[in-house]
């Protein structure tokens, strides 16, 4: 419910208001709670933090991590950077897109999986690498990744 | 009887199944009625051997790896001696034995949150010594050590600290840049996950040197395990009184933007703004976080500080080459047989490291190119493998050492595609403030496509464009993207051969 979302966002913002530069911690916490940053909450967040709603929009839209619409039940972050490319990441990415039927940033039709590109996960010595939600996986194949991503989210 | 084993919890070890091995060890011990103490450490950095299990025998750690759950029963059967995956003493494995571990002295050995173990292995000696020194003396020690920034630019750390020490300000800040966005790098992550107190100690020393009351660690969101470890270590350090009212550290988490690793974009991001680059001056040392005089240092720079204070500047500068003094955690990744982190004195050649220490490619094919210093670093061909790994040496060879990541490619790589990717990356990550970077990168992709399609006019356009990006960009994102692009073109012209082939 919208009023409930707004009320909860206010609580989150107030809890971080003592920080110097609270906005990113607040946005992370909001996304953690709701799976995305609800646009309806911008005015409330702005008020709690002494900012304008336009500033909130500017920040949310700058950072790739923040989404304003719900994502899939699992988020798959697949590395596209050079070390992973040296171990076949380009083909892995194409294969995954085909299997899931989505482009980068897309969510499968059943809402199970969102596919996000990542540019290095620090797992470059066991490339290609991915994060399934927060779980790191190395030397990964498209088959294994698809299985992990759909596990328990179907 | 109780049995003590060591198994990494580093993200790379987890990515290769360390938790599955841990579960198998617990189950097997239970089935055999053994009381198992499983200590989860950081990684030694020999990623190709992960999950790497260790057991101590007569004060020597013996290793087994890479393990899968199926290997576990035989470990118990063989009383942790005979096993097909037995590696012998871990520190005698050539990849490890050849290193000089200063910043990573404890990583892979201790449990990361065990403060007693940290002290028992030499931790806190640097801070204790710093507490007996004046701020000026600490800065002088850092200056004398020759330490330079490990984040990329290689700026002398002592001079940066001196500037902040002298800057006027009621409050000052120390910011640890742990944004580590370069492909092929994971030293920051590995240190936080394996020995977070080393960073905390380094930041506390810096704070004392410059007069800062607050520290911040800016971490990338792609490192969930490291974020959790840092937070836990900050709590332990607070309980122990290492952190507190006099000096405390907060963590801040980025949100997927590469350019936020650039120090002024990072400060904007910490302040809750879009991560766009600020023009300099003012320098962060004069006006940084919230306008306060601020030290921004890479995590490895700060983690190098405790050993400099405890062992002395002379000890530190006895390692290295030319103006690149001390040790550097080299990270070797991509298509490499023995990949991982190798901390050594500056000066080893690229070839010695990649072919000698790391055994060439994982695929067994010839090495074709090594990209050094991340997505803004140059591609080195074999003909430059005699280049020593140092700041000036890499620069003289047309590249940069950056955060010291080396990404190895075998002979199947198409350098035209890699050059195009460099432009694509710049276009994706540009903060949009300056035109040469924002527009130039997009034009760059198009122009490389034209070269690959055989357009004879395109190479000159690309050269011109690279010059504009190099000279006109606000920061090194646009300014250094020509490194990978032009090095690929210069050293591997045959991979851009569409023009000639089409004409023939
Ligand atoms: C696009 C861009 C990204 C950067 N990313 C990082 C980074 O992830 N980590 C880092 O320490 N420095 C990074 N830097 C360098 C920082 O701006 C800065 O030089 C560094 O944090 C200073 O610390 P140091 O002197 O200890 O190296 C980046 C620079 C640019 C231009
Ligand atoms: S390049 Fe893929 S994890 Fe670093």
Image (spheres, grey):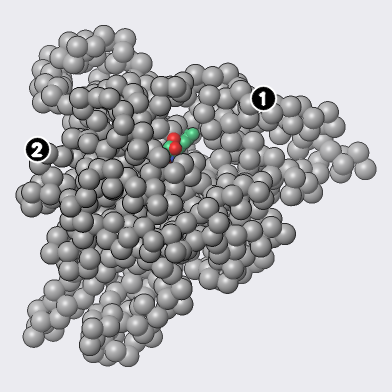
Residue at x 17% of width, y 78% of height: B4
The residue most toward the right is: B504
Query: Which label lies toward us, 1 or 2?
Result: 2
Please report whichever mark, 1 or 2, sits nearer to the chain's N-terminal start. Answer: 2
Q: Nearer the viewer, residue B422 or A98?
A: B422
**Figure quadrant of residue B466:** top right
Q: Nearer the viewer, residue B25 or B184?
A: B184
Q: Are marks 1 and 2 on the same chain?
A: yes
Task: Check the image and report above or below for B441 versus B374.
Answer: above
Q: Nearer the viewer, residue B423 or A6?
A: B423
Q: Which mark is residue B468?
A: 1
Q: Secondary structure at mark 2?
A: loop
Residue B141 in the image, given as x and y percentages of width and height: 33, 51
Q: Secondary structure at mark 1?
A: helix
**Figure quadrant of residue B311:** bottom left
The answer to whether residue B494 is left or right of residue B190 is right
């Amino acid at each position: 419910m919208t009023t409930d979302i707004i009320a909860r966002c206010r609580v989150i913002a107030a809890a971080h208001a003592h920080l110097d530069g609270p906005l990113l911690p607040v946005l992370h916490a909001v996304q953690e709670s709701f799976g995305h940053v609800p646009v309806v909450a911008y005015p409330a967040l702005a008020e709690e933090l002494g900012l304008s709603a336009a500033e909130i929009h500017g920040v949310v839209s700058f950072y790739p991590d923040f989404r304003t619409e719900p994502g899939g039940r699992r988020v798959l972050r697949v590395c596209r950077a050079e070390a992973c490319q040296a171990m076949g990441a380009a083909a892995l990415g194409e294969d995954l897109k085909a299997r899931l039927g989505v482009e980068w940033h897309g969510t499968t039709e059943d809402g199970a999986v969102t596919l996000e590109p990542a540019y290095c996960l620090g797992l470059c010595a066991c490339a290609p690498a991915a994060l399934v939600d927060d779980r790191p996986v190395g030397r990964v194949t498209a088959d294994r990744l698809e299985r992990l991503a759909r596990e328990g989210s179907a | 009887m109780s049995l003590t084993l060591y198994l990494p919890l580093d993200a790379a070890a987890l990515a290769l199944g360390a938790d599955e091995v841990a579960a198998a060890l617990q189950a097997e011990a239970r089935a055999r009625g053994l009381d198992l103490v499983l200590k989860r450490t950081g990684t030694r950095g020999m990623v190709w051997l992960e999950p790497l299990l260790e057991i101590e025998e007569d004060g020597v750690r013996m290793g087994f790896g890479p393990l899968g759950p199926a290997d576990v029963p035989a470990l118990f059967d063989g009383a942790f001696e005979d096993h097909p995956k037995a590696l012998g003493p871990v520190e005698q494995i050539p990849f490890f034995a050849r290193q000089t571990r200063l910043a990573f002295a404890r990583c892979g050995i201790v449990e990361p949150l065990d403060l007693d173990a940290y002290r028992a292995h030499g931790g806190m000696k640097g801070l204790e010594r710093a507490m007996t020194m004046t701020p000026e003396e600490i800065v002088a020690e850092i200056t004398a050590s020759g330490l330079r920034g490990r984040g990329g630019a290689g700026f002398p750390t002592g001079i940066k600290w001196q500037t902040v020490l002298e800057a006027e300000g009621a409050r000052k800040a120390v910011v640890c840049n742990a944004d580590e966005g370069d492909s092929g790098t994971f030293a920051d992550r590995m240190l936080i996950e394996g020995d977070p107190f080393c960073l905390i100690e380094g930041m506390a020393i810096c704070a004392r040197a410059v007069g800062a009351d607050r520290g911040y660690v800016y971490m990338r969101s792609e490192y969930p395990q490291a974020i959790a470890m840092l937070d836990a270590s900050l709590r332990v350090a607070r309980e122990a009184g290492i952190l507190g009212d006099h000096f405390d550290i907060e963590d801040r988490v980025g949100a997927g933007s590469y350019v936020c690793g650039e120090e002024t974009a990072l400060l904007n991001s910490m302040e809750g703004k879009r991560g766009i680059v600020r023009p300099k001056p003012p320098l962060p040392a004069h006006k940084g976080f919230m306008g306060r005089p601020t030290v921004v240092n890479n995590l490895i720079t700060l983690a190098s500080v405790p050993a400099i204070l405890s062992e002395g500047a002379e000890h530190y500068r006895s390692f290295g080459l030319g103006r690149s003094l001390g040790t550097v955690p080299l990270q070797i990744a991509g298509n490499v047989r023995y990949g991982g982190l190798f901390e050594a004195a500056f000066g080893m050649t690229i070839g010695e490291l990649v072919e000698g220490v790391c055994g060439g490619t994982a695929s067994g094919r010839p090495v074709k190119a090594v990209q050094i210093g991340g997505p803004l670093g140059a591609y080195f061909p074999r003909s430059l493998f005699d280049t020593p790994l140092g700041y000036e040496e890499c620069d003289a060879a047309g590249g940069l050492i950056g955060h010291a990541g080396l990404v190895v490619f075998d002979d199947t790589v198409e350098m035209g595609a890699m050059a195009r990717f460099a432009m694509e990356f710049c276009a994706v990550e540009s903060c949009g403030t300056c035109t040469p970077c924002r527009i130039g990168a997009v034009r760059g992709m198009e122009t490389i496509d034209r070269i690959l399609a055989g357009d004879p006019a395109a190479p000159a356009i690309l050269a011109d464009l690279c010059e504009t990006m190099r000279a006109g960009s606000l920061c090194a994102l646009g300014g250094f993207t020509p490194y990978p692009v032009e090095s690929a073109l210069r050293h591997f012209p045959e991979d851009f051969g569409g023009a000639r082939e089409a004409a023939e």
